Amino acid sequence: MNWDETGPEAGEPTGPALDDRLVDADADGEDTAVEAALRPKDLGEFVGQEKVREQLDLVLKAARARGATADHVLLSGAPGLGKTTLSMIIAAEMNAPIRITSGPAIQHAGDLAAILSSLQEGEVLFLDEIHRMSRPAEEMLYMAMEDFRVDVIVGKGPGATAIPLELPPFTLVGATTRAGLLPPPLRDRFGFTGHMEFYAPAELERVLHRSARLLDVAIDAEGAAEIAGRSRGTPRIANRLLRRVRDYAQVKAEGAIDRGIAEAALKVYEVDARGLDRLDRAVLGALLKLFGGGPVGLSTLAVAVGEERETVEEVAEPFLVREGLLARTPRGRVATPAAWAHLELVPPQHAVKGQPGLFGM
C-alpha cells in the first residue's frame, strides 16, 4: 500500500531494537519485496492524505494541460506514510520515467552532476532523504532546479574551469522526514510542498482491505479494525501486521481473519491494543514500577530497560510521547495518567494529585 523506503537517520541505532520490531516504520527487506504489488498506481487508488492528494492532483493536471513538466515537489513526514509511493504516482500521472536515489548516496557534487546530466526531458528524479545530501551537491542542485543547468568544474586550483551544462526540464521530488533540516534556499525552490500526516484508523482499514484483496486474504471489518488500531497511524506498519496475522490465520485457523484471530496473532507478536511492543512496554514499565512514574533521567531509564540511551530516545519515546503516555520535562521523563491506566497499574498518591514531583511544574 502506501509507504516509502526511508531508512534510519544518520547516527540512529540500527541494532535489534530497530531491525526486529514489527512496529518499526522503516522498511525492511520483506517490505521492499512486497511493496511493488501493493503500491497504488495512480492518485485515485491512493488512500488517505486527502489534502495533499487533492492539491497534487491540481498541480499535475495543470502541468499536463500546459504540456510542461510538473513543478518540483517536496514531500515531508514520518517514514511509512507514502512519500515514495506518491513520487511513483507523480511519474505515472505525467507519463514520465522515474529515477530513484537518496541523499546519503550523493556525497559529492560530481555524483549529482552525473545523475542530472543523464536525465531525459520530463523525467522525475526522486531524491529520498534529501536533507542528508552533502553541501556541495546541495548548492549545485539550486541552479539545476531553477535554471536547468549546472556548472561542471574541470581541473583544480587556479587552472580550474567551470563548464556550463544545460539540462532538459525535469521534475525533482524530494522526500524528507526532517523538513526543518532543509536550508531555506532549497525549500524555496520547490513549487509544491506537501506534509504527510499520520492516518486515521478508518483510513488504515481501507488500506488493509485493499492490501488483503491483493494478497488474496479474507478479512472482515472487525479484523481490519483491530489491526488498524495497532498500526500507529502508518500504512507500512498496517501492511506488515496484516502479513503476520495472515501467517497466524493460515497455521492456526481457516485462513480468514476476524477480530479474534487478529487479537490472538498480535498477542503472539507482542503488539498490544495501542500498538505498543515489548520495547515500549519495557520503557513504560520501568518508569512506572521502578521510578514511581518519574521524573527520571534518560540514561538511568535506558540502563533500567537494558537498552542504549539512543534506542530509548529515538526508537521508543517518539510514539510514547505522541500517544500521551510519556512526557519529556527539564527534570527528566515522567509518565502520564494514561500510562498507568494502559499498564493497569495503580498510580502513587502524588500521581493522582498531579503534584510537581510527577510533572516537573
Image: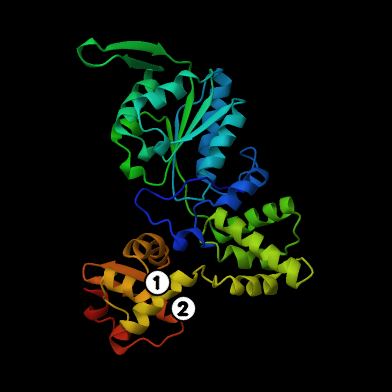
188 versus 33 height, above or below: above
Quarter of the picture containing the C terminus is bottom left
Label located before the other in sequence (1 or 2): 1
Q: Are marks 1 and 2 in contact (CB under 8 Å)?
A: yes
Which secondary structure, mark 1?
Answer: loop
C-alpha separation, residue under disc 1 versus residue under disc 2: 8 Å
Residue 165 drawn at (x, y percent)? 40, 12
Quadrant for residue 248, please give it: bottom right
Q: Position of residue 299 (x, y in %)?
A: 27, 69
Judging depth in this view, the residue of 294 and 359 nearest the camera is 294
- Asked if residue 131 lies left or right of residue 220, the reply is left
Give SS at disc 2.
Answer: helix
Vertically, is 54 above or below 235? above
Return the residue at label 1: 325
Give the residue pinned by disc 2. 342
Amino acid on which disc 2 is placed: His
Quadrant in which residue 107 is drawn: top left
Residue, x 26% and y 16% (percent of image)?
156
Please rate how many residues cluster around mark 2, counting C-alpha atoms within 10 Å: few if below 14, some from 14 to 19, many from 20: some
Residue 47 location (% of width, % of height) = 60, 48
Residue positioned 32% across, 80% down in the render? 293
Q: Residue at 50% of width from left, 69% of height from top?
A: 277
Q: Residues within 10 Å of mark 1 (few under 14, many from 20)?
A: some
